[in-house]
Image: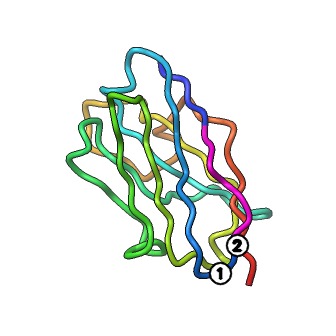
Amino acid sequence: QVQLVESGGGLVQAGGSLRLSCAASGRTFSRSNIGWFRQAPGKEREFVMAITWNGGRTYYADSVKGRFTISRDNSKNTVYLQMNSLKPEDTALYYCAAQKDATVDVSARSADFASWGQGTQVTVSS
C-alpha cells in the first residue's frame, strides 16, 4: 500500500505559478497511477490531472488544459503538478491519490482512488 503526502501549496497572485509535490512511501508507488484532485469550499471534489504508473500517459480536466502539467519521478517516489497561469477559480485544497487498480487505464473518478493525502491549500488572489 502507498502513503501520500502533498506539499507546495501557498498563496499566489493570478497569473502566477506553483508546483505541487506528492511524495509517496510504500512499495507499490512505482506501479500506481496517480491522480490530483481538488476541492473548493462548498463544492464537490473534482478531478484535475492524472498520470499512469510509468508516466507514459497523462490526463487532464478541461479547466486546466494548457496551464497545468503532471509528471513523476519514480526514482524519487514523487509526482509533481506544475500549475501555471493560475486563476482565482483554481483556489482549492489539492489532493493526490493512488488509483486502486493499476491494471486498468487512468480514471477521473475519485471513487477509483485510495490512499489520499491530507491535501495542500492553493489560494489564488485576483
Q: Position of residue 115 (x, y in %)?
A: 55, 29
x, y (%) of residue 12? 69, 70
Task: Identify which residue is drawn at 38% across, 19% down.
Answer: 28
What element does badge 2 sit on?
A: strand
Q: Residue at x 30, y 26 (%)?
A: 31
Majority secondary structure in the magenta region = strand
Q: Pointer 1: what residue?
A: 14
Q: Is residue 91 above or below residue 97?
A: below
What residue type is disc 1 on? Ala
Q: Give the residues drawn in magenta, as a range.
A: 6-12
Residue 124, which numbered label? Answer: 2
Mark 2 neighbour density, 10 Å: few (under 14) some (14–19) many (20 or more): many
Query: Is 11 a magenta residue?
Result: yes
Q: Position of residue 119 (x, y in %)?
A: 67, 44
User: Image check: 117 left or right of 100?
Assistant: right
| Residue sitting nearer the eye, 113 or 8 | 8
Q: Position of residue 48 (x, y in %)?
A: 49, 60
Contact, mark 2 vs mark 1 (Cβ under 8 Å) = yes
Q: Residue at x 43, y 57 (%)?
A: 49
